[in-house]
Image: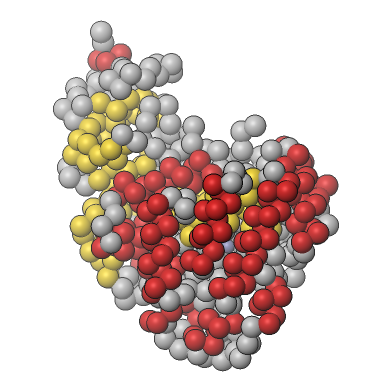
Amino acid sequence: MSGRDKACGTERGVRVSDHRPVELILRSTRVITPEGTRAASVAVAGGRIAAVLAHDAEVPAGAVLQDFGDDVLLPGLVDTHVHVNDPGRTEWEGFWTATRAAAAGGITTLVDMPLNSLPPTTTVAHLRTKQEVARTKAHVDVGFWGGALPDNVEDLRPLHDAGVFGFKAFLSPSGVDEFPELDQDGLARSLAEIAGFGGLLIVHAEDPHHLAAAPQRGGRKYADFLASRPRDAEDTAIGNLLAQARRADARVHVLHLSSSDALPLIADARRDGVRVSVETCPHYLTLTAEEVPDGASEFKCCPPIREAANQDLLWRALADGTIDCVVTDHSPSTADLKTDDFATAWGGISGLQLSLSAVWTEAGRRGHSLEDVVRWMSSNTARLVGLDDRKGAIAPGLDADFAVLAPDEAFTVDPAALQHRNRVTAYAGRTLYGVVKSTWLRGERIAADGDFAAPAGRLLTRRG
Ligand SMILES: [Zn+2]
């Protein structure tokens, strides 16, 4: 047996059909695999993981060894909720800057939301426009969500066939005029169409009637903003969505869950066979309403960051599996739109580069493992969009996408070190654990120590 054959071997009983020569061995005493964390050497051939070998495995002739010592080798994160805003609002964010921030933060795949760019991703022609813009700027792999609007039901199947990973809908105003929300009839029509071709609807679930009935005081006080986006707006919208999903036998996903009161509804529906998955975000898990300074609209997002007691229940739901994944909902704007009036400031938190460290800092404090974090931020998000045969785990046959993390190393968040376009962040000045030392995409190092390789990200499409 040659060295090459040995490295492409079957230590874990999985044979790799593509016997290209091994080009790279990534070695660490802590490699996070689907079976747990262990000392291992990961062999990479043709940009894919060829095998997970013993730590002291022989390095094949011609292969390069990268030994990370005790730093953790984990699968690159898959962030399925990012607003890149390019083209059209590139002064807010663009593919070049967003994907650099992603790479700096250990994220190797992102899926772009269909709104805030101009055009929004609501027709195949618009999707093509976005793909052309992203093609030469992507430092990480990029996929796209489509949008479900009141008047584009006939565009949904063509978008699905063109490779979007699913469709986003709002049930309350989205914040931009070109992306109107669905009422309950519109939701039923879109769900019926999407269920017809086995697609996925992902939903911003806040009920417009409950929002309209809530006190809208405006101004600098965070407590007033929180009162304007009450939990029952989320709970009601999620209840309606679950009922409609059940009726249409459709697959749905609840975006950025903030209200812990909705968790029993979701758990009950799932027990009854409704196909629903749920995400929450780093800011709901690490920041609390009690600590948001008045006027600090870098903390504004919708639904809002809620109280510490609510946050505890979100963590419990992650632990018991009611919440499947953690995604950033990175949604920046220019700094001037982040005024000190919570009613009129742009709503959106920029967390792409910091998400792994922020979540790990709080997860560790609460007794969760890095394996849990990888499940929430990589494996389960890859599965959500059907990329789990390519992404989201260190296993033979998958893309050689990795983050190298020093989990016990701390740093203080300095906005100047962030790569996203407008360096506004709710995390400024915080001490976080977990320094991303390097990020790898298909076996190439794309980010390390503030340096970046030329963009080599690919455009991803859903596989039918
Ligand atoms: Zn969003």
Q: Which quarter of the image is occupied by the N terminus?
A: top left
Residue drawn at (68%, 60%) of the image: 240
Residue drawn at (59%, 67%) of the image: 235
Q: Is 438 left or right of 461, judged from the image as shown?
A: left
Q: Is residue 211 above or below residue 458?
A: below
Q: Position of residue 216 (x, y in %)?
A: 63, 87
Foreground: 255 or 341?
255
Residue 127 visible: no
Quarter of the rendering containing residue 289: bottom left
Foreground: 125 or 54?
54
Q: Position of residue 370 (x, y in %)?
A: 29, 50
Q: Which quarter of the image is occupied by the C terminus?
A: top right
Image color mode: secondary structure
Foreground: 442 or 331?
331
Residue drawn at (67%, 57%) of the image: 241
Q: Position of residue 307 (x, y in %)?
A: 43, 76
Q: Is 166 left or right of 377, judged from the image as shown?
A: right
Q: Position of residue 403 (x, y in %)?
A: 34, 46
Residue 341 visible: yes
Q: Is 405 left or right of 286, judged from the image as shown?
A: left
Q: Is residue 289 above or below residue 112?
A: below
